[in-house]
Image (tube, helix red, strand yellow):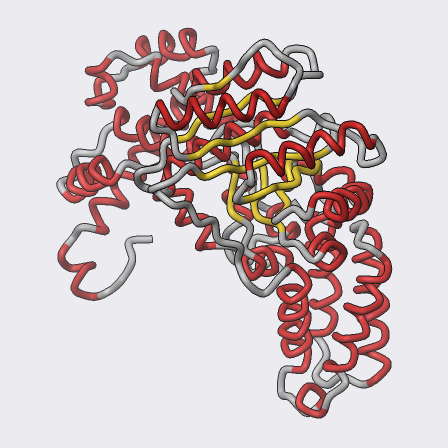
Amino acid sequence: MFNSLQERFDGIFRKLKGKGKLNDDNIKEAMREIRRALLEADVNFKIVKNFVDQVSEKAVGQEVMKSLTPGHQVVKIVHEQLIQLMGSQNFKLNFNDNRTNKIMMVGLQGSGKTTTSAKLASLGRKKFKNISPMLVACDVYRPAAIEQLTVLGKQLDIPTFTINTKNVVKIAKKALKEAESENKNLLIFDTAGRLHIDQVLMKELRDLKQTIQPDYIFFVADAMTGQDAVNVAREFNDQLEFDGVILTKMDSDARGGAALSIKAVTGKPVVFLGAGEKISDLEEFHPKRMADRILGMGDVLTLIEKAETAIDEEEALKLAEKMKKNQFNLTDFLNQLAQIKKMGPLDQLMGMLPGMNNNAMKNVKVDDKEMARIEAIILSMTPRERDKPALINGKRRLRIAQGSGSSVQQVNRLLKQFEQMKIMMKKFNNPKFMKSGMLPF
């Protein structure tokens, strides 16, 4: 996400940082480049003008011009303005354990409301204690919409309320009664996609809102549609007064114009980002973290949160003890790969590390297929071979290669890398190294 904007900003700021002192011409040239970069990222042109004017005003100040590092000062100003543009405060969901909490999902057809409803139910259950969700199928127009929501609910072990009627108000009333009798305290209403100009269907949403009195209404938008998503969001907000925006398909959007424009246009914040097809691929939107990502500063906090969600703490402690005793084997390595995969695609994880902008990523080979190949090789070994790789002779290597669809050279490379890793771990746990404070690599 934001790949093209990251690359453009990286080039602009490298030029600025390379200059000992800045003058009006340097600043004007940089502002022209920033304006062009934001417009190419499909940011609303009025927002771009205001953004550049505000940055320019601060950048030509005495504290920047006379600074020892004027280029860094300009980056700091842009960073602050990006945070302000996207909303300086994080949106926080608040649920009450003692009553039924209700969320309405609205938006255009094809924006991802049904999948996002399931993702949000799963997130709510994980994030909040004593929250028991239920999905409510109010998309009565799209073929198979109800079935899709039901299937997602079964995968998550979350009930889905459905009845055979086209009347969404009737569905909602019965769902509220069902939730009360089943002790479900979070209802997520998945509504049908519609155009804001369809007055009949918009009235249906207003009637549903009046009936259930939702705690939150979230507008779900496809990030790849850029300014179209922003314009439709404004129209929906005028008629429904929603609380926030969930942007889907952010992993496929290299521009990011919608994320940068929505708060300024609608006055409502981006709340969540959908960045993948997995149920777990829904992350909270933090303006500061997003500004950090755009400027190549990384997003370590989100990376840590992903790790905490994916990695079993007890298993991690056992593994640490094994590493300490140099008993780490290929089965442990396989388990580690499985936990890393839960965190998301490798390129996304690498992009959250500080300094890993597009230019840096070009020099790093990030290949999820390589992880799959490593898994296949290890799974083609016997348990005894995984525990004692030294047993793997030429004949065994050939069998493993054939069983995993790999070459003998690839098997040899994996075994060599594993042995090197064990040597490194052994050195790392050597008291001499620990005492000296030196790293073994």
The answer to which quarter of the image holds residue 317 is top left
State the residue at coordinates (80%, 62%). Answer: 47
State the residue at coordinates (25%, 20%). Answer: 386
Q: Position of residue 375 (x, y in %)?
A: 40, 21
Q: Position of residue 257 (x, y in %)?
A: 75, 50
The answer to which quarter of the image holds residue 228 is top right
**Foreground residue, 13 or 330?**
13
- Quarter of the image with the N terminus in it: top right
**Foreground residue, 242 or 260?**
242
Q: Is residue 423 left or right of residue 21?
A: left
Q: Is residue 406 left or right of residue 30?
A: left
Q: Position of residue 285 (x, y in %)?
A: 55, 50
Vertical comparison of 230 with 157: above or below: below
Task: Please count the marks in the image.
Answer: 0
Q: Is residue 19 left or right of residue 101?
A: right
State the residue at coordinates (82%, 32%). Answer: 199
Vertical comparison of 326 with 360: above or below: above
Q: Position of residue 371 (x, y in %)?
A: 46, 27
Q: Is residue 24 visible?
A: yes
Q: Is residue 55 left or right of residue 119?
A: right
**Foreground residue, 52 or 220?**
220
State the residue at coordinates (63%, 32%). Answer: 208
Q: Is residue 7 visible?
A: no
